[in-house]
Image (cartoon, grey):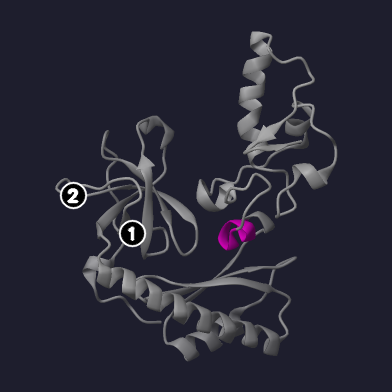
Amino acid sequence: MKKDKKKSDIPVKATPQSGNLWRARVLPISDFEFCSPPANMKIGQGELVVMSTRYGIDVARILGPVSNLDSVGNAEVRQIIRIASKKDLSKHRSLEKLEKEAFEICRAKISALKLSMKLVSSHYTFDKWKILFFFTADGRVDFRELVRLLAVRFKKRIELRQIGARDETRVVGGVGVCGRLYCCHSITDRLATVPVKTAKDQNLPPSLLKTSGQCGRLLCCLSYELGHQASKEKSGVADGKTKYKCGGYTF
């Protein structure tokens, strides 16, 4: 494994500060981070930045400011290194091409080793120090030989991460029945379990075809609507006949 020799590329943490705390979406893998820029850096919503993440250095898009520090809790706040330059974005596009190549190579080796796993995506960290491969599988998989072969082939640090069906949808992305990007891909990666009771409490039909997302699990937005529905019932507005609406789609 190669060691990173650039001290500036070592992921660093920041201290959350009121008025200078932001939420960002890591572009390649749709992870979401709390982040903070240096005191002399001004950023805005929609800005592309180079920042530290849980996996290393990456390019991320600023979603917006975080006004309630209590909502952050014990989550780590990452340091924004700089606003992405044209050179950074050009490098990001070149890495996307390398990721496609790495994906095909890894998939071929999985087939050759006859491993029971489905490769979902591959990702180079921005400093090219590490390649991450995300996969799904029904059970535990012994991928030690696969890691060895990939390390020999790429001369990089290799990480394989097993993810679930909901995380697969988050990484791949897509458009929901509401016409918007999947919540898990565009808003948050906090994939809390949505119990069946959530749908029953909103008087929704039992049909899973209407209340399930692409991942096969109950729609994440059902939990968002639950608080709104409870508020209406408490105020006496709900009559039990109100149809559920999400982004213009009516159940």
Graded by Cα atoms within 10 Å as few (under 14), some (14 to 19) or many (20 or more), the crowding at tag 2 reads: few
168 magenta-colored? yes
Residue with the mark numbered 2: 41
In the rendered view, tell whether residue 215 sits above or below residue 195. Answer: below
Q: Residue 249, image x and y in percent?
A: 69, 39
Point out the stretch of residues depicted in magenta.
167-173
Q: Residue furthest left?
A: 40
205 on left or right of 50: right
- Answer with the quarter of the image where residue 16 lies: top left
What residue appears at the point 64 percent right and 87 percent down from the top-left corner? 108
Q: Residue furthest front?
A: 248
Asked whether 209 or 3 is in front, the reply is 209
Dividing the image into 4 quarters, which one contains the N terminus?
Answer: bottom left
In the rendered view, tell whether residue 11 sits above or below residue 198. Answer: below
**Which three-letter amino acid code belongs to the residue tagged 2?**
Met
What residue appears at the point 66 percent right and 76 percent down from the top-left corner? 142
Q: Is residue 93 visible?
A: yes
Residue with the mark numbered 1: 52
Q: Residue 34, image x and y in percent?
A: 38, 46
Q: Is residue 127 visible?
A: no
**Which three-letter amino acid code belongs to the residue tagged 1?**
Ser
188 on left or right of 220: left
What residue appears at the point 46 percent right and 65 percent down from the top-left corner? 28
In the rendered view, tell whether residue 145 sits above or below residue 216. Answer: below
